[in-house]
Image (tube, rainbow, N blue to C red):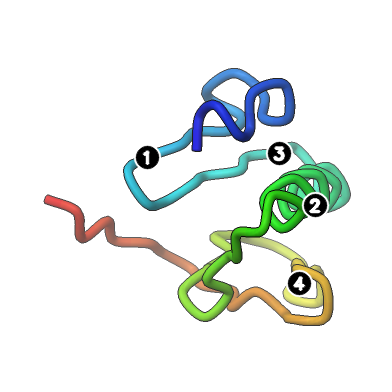
Amino acid sequence: MDALLQGTVREAPWDMLFADDMAVVGETIVEVQEELRKITDRIEGSGLRENRVHGVQLGRGDAENVLQIQDSSVKRVGEFKYLGQ
């Protein structure tokens, strides 16, 4: 994944890649949405697919600002618990 997304993702703490997860951080919903679009285009352009069912958006404030990955809304949550450890 690192090699595939080289030049697409930003340095941590903005975009962070884990074994099978990714965190995309931004100051605005528009910034995060644009980063997701670039990452999705790169991943799907290589023939891979994203698992859109398990993606979540951690956010506060305006509940109407929901991220989209193509035609799918990303579930919004108020807190996130990492289950990897």
Mark 1 and mark 2 lie on one chain; the one further toward the N terminus is 1
Kindly report the distance in space between the C-alpha atoms of the residues bearing marks 1 and 2: 19 Å
| Residue at 50%, 29% in the rendered image | 2
Q: How far from the left and from the top, in percent, is residue 29?
A: 80, 53
Instruction: Identify the secondary structure beneath mark 1.
Output: loop
Q: Is residue 6 left or right of residue 66?
A: left
Instruction: Identify the secondary structure beneath mark 2.
Output: helix
Kindly report the distance in space between the C-alpha atoms of the residues bearing marks 2 and 4: 19 Å
Q: Are marks 2 and 4 in contact (CB under 8 Å)?
A: no
Q: Are marks 2 and 3 in contact (CB under 8 Å)?
A: no
Mark 1 and mark 4 lie on one chain; the one further toward the N terminus is 1
Up-down relation of residue 74 to residue 25 (above or below): below
- Camera-side mark, 2 or 4: 2
Q: Are marks 1 and 4 in contact (CB under 8 Å)?
A: no
Mark 4 and mark 3 lie on one chain; the one further toward the N terminus is 3
Mark 2 and mark 3 lie on one chain; the one further toward the N terminus is 3
Identify the disc placed on residue 26.
3
Identify the disc placed on residue 66.
4
Residue position for label 2: 41
- Camera-side mark, 1 or 2: 2
Q: Is residue 40 left or right of residue 3?
A: right
Residue position for label 1: 18
Instruction: Identify the secondary structure beneath mark 3.
Output: loop
| Residue at 80%, 52% in the rendered image | 41
Residue type at tag 2: Asp
Residue type at tag 1: Phe
Residue type at tag 3: Gly
